[in-house]
Amino acid sequence: MLDQPKVMKELQESAEQLFMDLSSEFKLAHTVWNSIADDPLFAETIAASRSPWLIPTWTGLLGTTDTITPTKVEYTVFSVDGSQIYPDRHQGTSCCLINIGSIALSYGTKTYISLNSTPSIYIPNKHSESENPVELVNCRRLELELHEGVIQAQELLQKLPETRVIGMFDGSLIFWHLEGKEEAIQEEFIAKYIQSLHQLYTLNVPCIGYISLPHSKELVNLIRMKLADFDPNINKEYKKIEHLLDTHIASFFLEPFMRTTFFASNSHIIEYYPNHLKPHFFYLNLGQEIVRIELPAWITQNATLVNFICQTLIDQSKKGHGYPVCLAEAHEQAVVKGSDRDFFYHIIQKIGLEHKQRLYFSQKSLKKRCIGI
């Protein structure tokens, strides 16, 4: 049982850490950003330096922005999200469930709505004793999400050939979770991820990764390098802005319905992507939130398409009161509740008995089902 008075006391004592005064960091970062945003030589200088942090690349001036005019556009959007029941050693089985939810919405002269939920059983292969099965489930879930995205795109192009189709995924298109993984894990999943992204490319269906409340620090790292005079091993001035995020920096110059220039990520995992699929990103002010949008390189080369994507994002955000309707509804289709989890393990146990096998639950699991005094 939670001791609420003790919680209140602990929170009061931690108030200064919870609600830090970042005004001095904001002021310093804003000043430095203004000095580098319009510097035509800054990209060249940063490229020639050695940074211990992830540094993006870009073309043109760092502070370039583009204003998006909100307007009514006809489009069809699909979104895919996933949820799961992770392997639980207390339940006596390594079997898990991945549920992929999807939605398609059409706006314009034709109205079209499609909702779908597809469960999939997954038993992680034991690549090594050190590999966390939870991570394998996460890898598999993303594989299924991207594959479902291809299926959605193909169906929509057949059913609604005259509308423009766009796909939205919740989260990053950069496969961060594969960094540091064993080679067998990377080879098993990266090829499938890339294949799905390439299929969307051949269908000419743009897809984006939508990141709400991003914690990225790639723009912050540019300011850090400037503060350190491009040598952070000697100059520690960069520590003065340790608590800022990219969205803080973007708030200095992005008005509602404006976006930044395109940035290319330089994560090591990007080396696996072919050039036309390498992820780029930009920050977009949707009015209620500044979000990070990731998209394959081929889309960035089409200014009209990028503008259409931004208009779609603004429209979806307005319809969803700050968060895209399609992403919220895809999540609702994917979510696995506690009762679903109980059903899942009940059916596994039932099938086991039919095969004259039984699950051996841990005493901890059994105790949770019936607490006695």
Image (cartoon, helix red, strand yellow):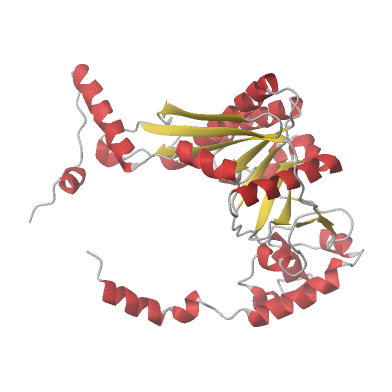
Which residue appears at 58% of the width and 30% of the height? Answer: 113
Of 353 and 41, the residue lying toward us: 353
Q: Residue 355 falls in which quadrant of the image?
A: top left
Judge left or right: residue 132 versus residue 91. Answer: right
Q: Nearer the viewer, residue 72 or 36?
A: 72
312 vs 360, left or right, is right
Q: Judge whether 227 appears above or below 190 on screen.
A: below
What quarter of the picture does the N terminus occupy? bottom left
Query: Residue 330: horizontal and vertical position, in percent?
Result: 53, 38
Residue with the most extreme left position: 373
Q: Is residue 284 visible?
A: yes
In the displayed orientation, state which residue is furthest to the right: 40
Percent of width and height locating residue 117? 47, 30
Figure disc tally: 0
Q: Position of residue 135 (x, y in %)?
A: 47, 42
Quarter location, residue 348:
top left
In the image: residue 114, left or right of residue 58: left
Residue 320 percent coordinates (x, y): 58, 49
Who's the residue at 83% across and 63% down the image?
63
Residue sitting at x 32%, y 73%:
7
Q: Is residue 180 visible?
A: no
Where does the C terminus fall, quadrant-wise?
bottom left
Closer to us: 49 or 197: 197
The residue located at (75%, 34%) in the rendering is 274
Query: Relative to 215, is 228 above or below?
Result: below
Q: Which of 156 and 202 is in front in this view?
A: 156
Q: Quadrant of residue 156?
A: top right
